[in-house]
Amino acid sequence: MEYTLQRAGGPAPDPDDQVQRSIFLGRLEEMAQFAVNWGRKNSLWPFNFGLSCCYVEMATAFTSPHDLARFGSEVIRATPRQSDVIVISGTPFLKMAPVIKRLYEQMLEPKWVISMGSCANSGGMYDIYSVVQGVDKILPVDVYISGCPPRPEAFLQALILLQQSIQGERRPLSWMIGPQGVTRMPKVSMRDERTPERVAATTLRTPDEV
Amino acid sequence: MSATIQEVRPLGVIGEIRARFPDEALVEQATADGIPTVWVPRARLQAALRLLKHGLPQPYRMLYDLTAVDERLRQHRAGLPPADFTVVYHLISFERNSDIRVKVALHEPDLQLPSIVSLWLNADWYEREVWDLFGIRFDGHPNLQRIMMPRTWQGHPLRKDHYARATEAERLVMDQARVDREQEALRIKPEEWGMKTADEDHDYMILNLGPNHPSVHGVFRVMLQLDGEEIVQAVPDIGYHHRGAEKMGERQSWHSYIPYTDRIDYLGGVMNNLPYLMAIERMAGIEVPARAQTIRVMMSEFFRITSHLLFYGTYAQDVGSMSPVFYMFVDRQKAYDVIEAVTGFRMHPAWFRIGGVAADLPQGWERLVREFLDWMPKRLKDYEKMALRNTILKRRSIGIGQYSTEEAIEWGVTGPGLRATGLAWDYRKARPYSGYENFDFEIPTAVNGDVYDRCVVRVEEIRQSLRIIEQCLNHMPSGDYKARHPLATPPRKDRTMEDIETLIHHFLSVSWGPVIPAGECTMTVEATKGLNSYYLTSDGGTMSYRTRIRTPSYPHLQMIPYISRGMMVPDLIAIIASIDFVMADVDR
């Protein structure tokens, strides 16, 4: 006699289907990668670092109206050794460049860089003798935010993009396991991605009304 | 302008100087701003400045600015003494409510003149800046070192023959060797800065604070000589935020430079546009319509509020209370909602234009402003309980970092830092601009000039700003939002298709930009942090010949060693918080 939760007289359960439903099948390594990346992306600790105007908008994102805690990134660290992500928020000055570089080197792997604002992206308005023309001349950058300064919401979006990218990363789980080296997600241009949606807009709000 | 000043004082200050130096041929220069300007020979500089500071009735006690001009490419110099470089001293007399500009001509290769550090303590950094950016030496300066550029830098960037663009320079390679070399140049050599590592019976600790430290508000570094936790000597080191804004003015058109001014005091937003545009408007002879003036006042006061709120929050945070900053950023958000609806942007709208503002106020602005005015006062009341009356905050700040009115003037301190010492001197009252004479508001002052008082004054200023905004709301004049003047930008489009002259004029004005008549002009405003002025020199072109930006935070920072000596390290943090500076306002 077979005992099931189904009413008597129904079709006999498919054993394969039963296995699929009650037993998880997958590669342990991928599971581990997924879990580790999930943990990493939801507890990104930013370095308390700011260069100029953009830092004010970044700090605005930390406060209550925008509430960065929703993304697990509110734990600002005052030392590079405890932080996971450095936001280059402002102009990379020539006099500051060796300092930025050293602070970045003092961060422990895995570490990520967000370049916030036009100055950090490319020098922006300041093609001038004392400004490095983009922080990517001295550091690898994961996410670029456009704007001068970008809005706090743009910073939040960059953080979400970075989280998505971290979820897709492959880093060795240990120096004993699997291939060594880091595989990152390809960088996508949000401008290209959103162009169809933006071009489709037909009604624009007038600036003459609030 | 200069005629009116001479009516008040028949002899004039230049007459007073002439009376003391009868043998010298002192050249008097007419400027668009009407500030008495006199060229003195190098040998007489110190004597003339000493006379102005100590020898006259109602003396000129504040060294307001000290800068230089590379005159080598300047064409419109009729009537001025020949010079390759000019060093300019700008002094203020509070008793006379008047300024004077003293100029000294220098010739290559003999680019040196006597230092005036013995006369004014705050000349120290100004002279270092002129040395760094122009290569002019000051004899007798105690430590004539680079201040803006890295120690490893070659050349003097504000000279006309120095390149302006980073893309003109060699490609930057920041490899390990370069990092090591630059880091070595940043290493503290105590004896160079007058610090000691040991005494007969004492060992001192040398501590480096910055250039990236959570409580120094930006990229700013202080080198400390400590005896235990007591500060024996504090030496600020700046220049980490030098964006070359003054050099930038020499290659942007008068109009396209406006966004750069927003980023000088980056918390002041459009208020930075004001002195720059006022100087251009004075040189070009543009009268700004009453509506434009009132809109400018209203938006400037909004930015004063957002800036002071940020100060209030970070100040409370730096002396140990975490929550206020979160409340104050909510209010900042409310203010930005209004600012954004009017100007279209949050922090750097660059919304003022030569001759007025970029657009008229949007329909329904009154409601937004009214909502903000209803919202803010009760919040300020809460903060008073939460922050100002908090015992811990009080005990950490009362009696700390104290200075008197005399000391403030000696060091060039202006704005809330000066008013906290009891001197009720506000540029908006003393020399009203942009229609401030029509507003009813008070000048908040305090008594002790300490960290706490500087905060109290700013909080009261928020209330006064709300009063001014309310008056703007109730009495907004009608009329144009931009002057109908050929040099106002952008030029009017409506009649361009009717006659060819208007079309040509429009085309030139939007492609090359307006041509401002040759001349010099300084215009000053009471900015969020103190007096901010633009000293513009036009050589009759579409670009400025020299743009000098005098910012309040620069002299304020210079005072840190003086007021922090003998204090504890946490007191230094409170002092830094109370000064309310942004590094872009220091290094420009």
Image (spheres, rainbow, N blue to C red):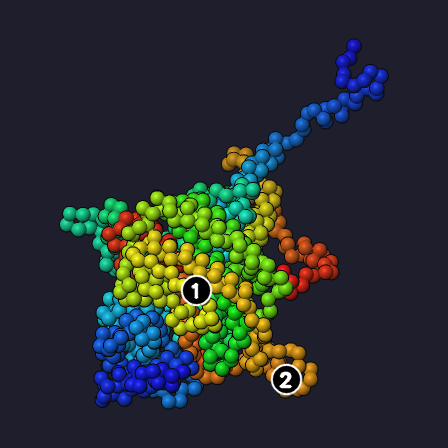
Q: Which residue is mark 1?
A: B441
Identity, as a three-letter code, of the amino acid under mark 2 = Thr
Residue at the outermost left position = B200
Q: Quadrant of the N terminus of chain B?
A: bottom left
* Residue B161's disc number: none
**Label 2 packing within 10 angstroms: few (<14), some (14-19), many (20+):** some
Can residue A102 be spotted in the picture? Answer: no
The structure residue drawn at horizontal position 31% and vertical position 60%, both measured from the top left corner, is B421
Nearer to the camera, A46 or A53? A53
Give x and y (percent) for residue B118: 23, 69
Question: Which picture quadrant has residue B110?
Answer: bottom left
Give x and y (percent) for residue B25: 27, 89
- Choose the circle earlier in sequence order: 1 or 2: 1
Q: Quadrant of the C terminus of chain B?
A: bottom left
The structure residue drawn at horizontal position 33% and vertical position 71%, both measured from the top left corner, is B64
Q: Which residue is mark 2?
A: B502
In front: mark 1 or mark 2? 1
Above or below, B96 relative to A117? below
Under tag 2, what secondary structure? helix
Residue at the outermost top position = A1
Under tag 1, what secondary structure? loop
Can residue B342 be spotted in the picture? Answer: yes
